[in-house]
Image (cartoon, rainbow, N blue to C red):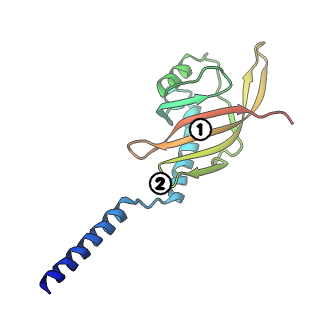
Amino acid sequence: MKHLKMKNLISVVAVTFIVLLTGCGKVQVNFKEEEKKITFAWTDWSKKALSGKPDSLAYYYADDALIIGTDPEFINDKAEVTKIYADAPTNFELDIKWDDEEKPNIIQFSNDGSMAYSLDGNAVKMPDSTGKIHTVHNKVLHIWKKNTEGNWRVSLLMVYPQRSK
């Protein structure tokens, strides 16, 4: 009888330990709060861009960010992004108008809340080969991930022009 009680106690302790272990492994993600954090980064990034400072323009990129645009060459990391902004002509203006300046159009999260994507639209004034300024309308996909401090940074940015209707 004493042996049976000890065996039951060990079983209860083992089951309790397993429940606690698996329960503690799951982190509850408050997706509304995470959406607010990405929205803050979104609006703050636009404010930082107005400074024209290369480090501010590149602030919300992850260190290993990849940017894919209409150019045949990819931009491979935050340092390269910063260099591109630093090397831009002094009269270069980053004049981007987003579909919604207050928040991304769509934000979706991974189940564990460690990554997200946002899909947006923008209009950018760009010179053509003759120097004439044109407005280009784009769709923009941001893949966000949390850095080691838990802050959202863009890991992948894809920009593609919208087709004329």
Identify the residue at the far top of this view. 130
Neighbours of disc 2 within 10 Å: few (<14), some (14-19), many (20+): few
Q: Tell me the quarter of the image containing the C terminus.
A: top right
Residue mark closest to the camera, 1 vs 2: 2
Instruction: Tell me residue 93's x, y (percent).
Output: 65, 25
Quarter of the rendering containing residue 85: top right
Q: In the displayed structure, does residue 148 sit left or right of residue 85? A: left
Quarter of the rendering containing residue 101: top right
How far apart marks 1 and 2 lie (CA) works out to: 28 Å
Identify the residue at the far bottom of this view. 1
Q: Amino acid at mark 1?
A: Ser
Q: In the displayed structure, does residue 95 sit left or right of residue 148? A: right
Please report the residue visible at 14 percent of the width from the left and 81 percent of the height from the top: 3
**Observer-nearest residue: 47 or 58?**
58
Number of marks in the image?
A: 2
Q: Tell me the quarter of the image containing the N terminus.
A: bottom left
Helix, strand or loop at label 1? It is helix
Earlier sequence position, callout 1 versus callout 2: 1
Instruction: Tell me residue 151's x, y (percent).
Output: 44, 45
Q: Amino acid at mark 2?
A: Asp
Please report the residue visible at 55 percent of the width from the left and 20 percent of the height from the top: 84
* Residue labelled with disc 2: 112
**Observer-nearest residue: 78 or 51?**
78
Q: In the displayed structure, does residue 36 sit left or right of residue 151? A: right
Identify the residue at the far right of this view. 165
Instruction: Tell me residue 88's x, y (percent).
Output: 59, 18
Above or below for 84 versus 164: above
Please report the residue visible at 12 percent of the width from the left and 84 percent of the height from the top: 2
Q: Which mark is residue 46?
A: 1
Neighbours of disc 1 within 10 Å: few (<14), some (14-19), many (20+): some
Q: Which mark is residue 66?
A: none
Helix, strand or loop at label 2? It is loop
